[in-house]
Amino acid sequence: MEPIGVSFFVLYLVALLAIGFWAYRRSVRSSEDYFVASRSIGPVVLLLSMAATNFSAFTFFGFAGASYRYGLAYYGIMAFGTGFMAISFYIIGRGVWRLGKKKGYITPPELIGDRFKSDSLRMIFLVVMVVFTLPYLATQAIGGGIALEQLTDGTVTYEVGAVIVTAVITVYVMVGGMRADAYTDVLQGIVMLVAMLAAVGIVASGLGGFTEANSRLAHDFPDLLTRPGGGDYFTPQIWISFMVLWTLCDPMFPQLFARFYTARDEKSIKFSMMMYAPITAILFLAPVLIGAWGNLEFPNLPLAEQDSIMPKMIGEFAPSWMLGVVLSGAFAALMSTADSQLLVLSSMLTRDVYSKWLKKDASYRQEFIVGKIMVLCLALIGLGIALSSVETIFDTLTKTTFTGLAVLFPTTIAALYWKRANKWGCLASIVAGEATYAGFYFGHIPSDLSFGFLPVVPVIIVTVVVLVAVSLGTARPTTSASTE
Amino acid sequence: MRILENKWFWTVAFGALFALSIDLWAWDWTEPSVLGLPYIVVYIILLETALFVMFVLFSRYYWVDREEGR
């Protein structure tokens, strides 16, 4: 166990808790303050909060592993796809922020339900968001357990690591709410960026320099520099599918959707949109390069070990204490996602279940207290999933999160822009979209029918067609809200 | 700069940029390269730069509203 690396990590955890208590001292005892920081988050904090929330443990370990397998072209679908997604900050974020400010919305389902005057739609929107986010929350605890075990050379076991990471997140989210969440994201975003840049610099230097590393890769593994890439992965259909997937799915992550409510003004959202492209361009290059370069030092790794190529490469070229710094970057990525998921799930269960069905006259203060209890319960559920053996269901839900949430995109667009849309169209769209996806996933619909695309493409076509057809085929809505 | 205040200009511009990201015409290119990075990485960095510039202009000239702010 490397003392400097571990000390750095402990210092990082202490800093997170300190921010949590600082946020508590600035807080007001109301649900609006607890869940959306009284809509006071400015441009720089919002940008770093959006980025840190969006980039999870997958950004560190998953990107590098995928690049190890498929090559540098992986950068294209991840960086541009995610950067382009920021256009939704205007298309969706602007309208969500305006409606939230005007009508006091805190959660995504209450905006959708109120827009279409439908409790059923609000509930189905809630269920889809919770079902696909909860397992994803658990993966962050799993990532934390694995990373801590690695950092301490097994002195801290995976189980204890998962408990420590979950406990720290739970404390600062319970204590400081969204304000703690957003400001810890700033620290986590900076740690993530520094760790990534340090890692790529160290590894490139160890391989004889940046250009030399790429030249060796081109000589020894030429297929990793072009498309279709390793394993002939990058077909045009796969490329198009990923570009579509990120654009539609990322803004439907409830933790990102709800971030729009927290903005102080539209300028804050604009600034986040503008800076998203440079952030993805810089941040995503590092793990992709390290992953592909990993073939030079660790060729032919079995599939199960490929996602750990990043720490392997750091361990190979950096002093041992540096591994602690880089792994803190990974912790930053996963914890900044997990804390936001925890808070937004709590807000939805509080506002869309407790206040909607159990105690209709709940005050902001009562919601504030229930919200904290929900955070604790959800953290325990996430930890329970991480430590239990329900892998089949869990794996299925995690793998399906992105497309499962993308199904909500057409309904959200209809809510903001299409006055003729009605609740029947949206309900049918979501049900048809999820059913179609389940059909593809479980093999009830032949995969040939996706014509080489990922299921997200036919699924989105189905959801749009059903939404339009059913809305036009049923009664015109009598009342509606709009963004303007 | 009136064109930058036009909805259809931005619809076409962002649509075109998205279409450019699906560069089927250069699927198997590796050259030219910069610092040993292959064409596709350099190309994506250029597209991201263009995206950044477009977002800046879009925010400056199109996404403006008298109600903006508090």
Image (cartoon, coloured by chain):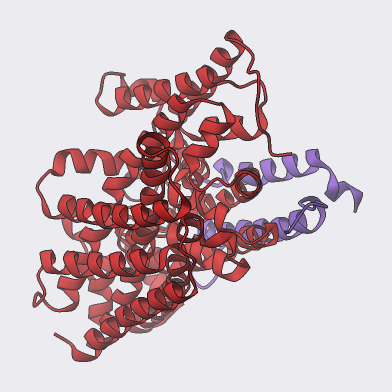
Chain colours: A red, B purple
- Most distant residue in the bottom direction: A4
Is A139 positioned to the left or the right of A58 in the image?
left
**Which quadrant of the figure has residue A172?**
bottom left
Q: Nearer the viewer, residue A262 or A43?
A: A262
Q: Relative to A278, does residue A478 appear above or below in the rendering?
A: above
- Picture coordinates of residue A318, whole percent (x, y): 28, 85
Q: Nearer the viewer, residue B20 or A324?
A: A324
**Which quadrant of the figure has residue A235?**
top left
Q: Relative to A96, does residue A315 appear above or below in the rendering?
A: below
Q: Nearer the viewer, residue B30 or B51?
A: B51
Q: Nearer the viewer, residue B4 or B63?
A: B63
- Most distant residue in the right direction: B2
- Picture coordinates of residue A367, whole percent (x, y): 41, 51
Q: Looking at the rendering, in which quadrant would you find the N terminus of chain B?
A: bottom right
Q: Looking at the rendering, in which quadrant would you find the C terminus of chain B?
A: bottom right
Q: Residue at x 31, y 26 (%)?
A: A438
Mark yes or no: residue A16 visible: yes
**Which quadrant of the figure has residue A266?**
bottom right
Q: Residue at x 12, y 68 (%)?
A: A160
- Picture coordinates of residue A90, whole percent (x, y): 66, 48
Report the number of numbered marks. 0
Is A118 positioned to the left or the right of A479 in the image?
left
Mark yes or no: residue A138 visible: no
- Picture coordinates of residue A406, whole percent (x, y): 45, 37
Q: Residue at x 40, y 52 (%)?
A: A366
